[in-house]
Image (cartoon, rainbow, N blue to C red):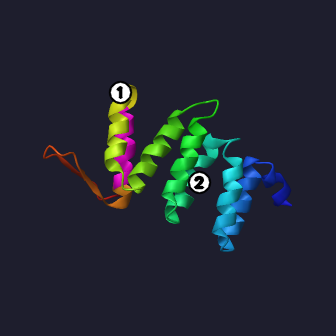
Amino acid sequence: MLAPLAAGGNRNPSVYLAEILIRAGQDDGALEVLRRALPKDPECLLSRWRELTVERGRVDEALAVVDELAQGPHGLTENLYDERLCLLVHAGREEEAIQAVSERSEDEWEGAEVVGEALAAMGRSFDFGDGTQVMCTGS
């Protein structure tokens, strides 16, 4: 019943079907269902997509999808930017995330917060190379 609706990339049926597939141990199927729906509604589905790919060690795949979506008609939206920063941190590419924040000065504080939250969630720290170190332990 959900499969035909999810096949069309509809958000709600796709999320429900993906959750059912995850519970059934079919992670690849769940990710594929969400992947098909992402172009139609990336703002609502992207955080769940990121969570699932990170949990399954597929961060590079998630980054590729975010970069692909950023090439679409809406470009690199704020949500895509934030998710990309978080994925870079999860991929162990903190320096690249910090560089991306510094290159986008109009929202430097918000970007730094996204990077900090991702580090905190992982219980990690980052050394800025000038003797300044940020230690995040999570909440």
Q: Nearer the viewer, residue 20 or 9?
A: 9
Q: Quadrant of residue 75?
A: top right
Q: Residue at x 36, y 56 (%)?
A: 92
Q: Nearer the viewer, residue 41 or 91?
A: 91
Q: Nearer the viewer, residue 28 or 117?
A: 28
**Is residue 109 one of those drawn in magenta?**
yes
Going by the picture, which residue comes out furthest to the left? Answer: 131
- In the rendered image, which residue does mark 2 sit on? 49
**Amino acid type shown at disc 1:** Ser
Q: Secondary structure at mark 1?
A: helix
Going by the picture, which residue comes out furthest to the top? Answer: 106
Q: Name the mark on residue 105.
A: 1
**Is residue 4 one of those drawn in magenta?**
no
Q: Name the mark on residue 113.
A: none
Q: Residue at x 63, y 34 (%)?
A: 72
- Report x, y in % for residue 23: 66, 71
Q: Nearer the viewer, residue 107 or 39?
A: 39
Q: Report the quarter where the N terminus lies.
A: bottom right
Q: Is residue 136 above or below residue 95?
A: below
**Amino acid type shown at disc 2:** Trp
- The segment highlighted magenta reads 108-119
Q: CA distance from mark 1 to mark 2?
A: 27 Å
- Report x, y in % for residue 125: 26, 55
> Which is nearer the N-term, disc 1 or disc 2?
2
Q: Report the quarter where the C terminus lies.
A: bottom left
Report the magenta stretch's main SS: helix
Q: Label 1: how many residues lie within 10 Å, few (<14), some (14-19) or many (20+)?
A: few
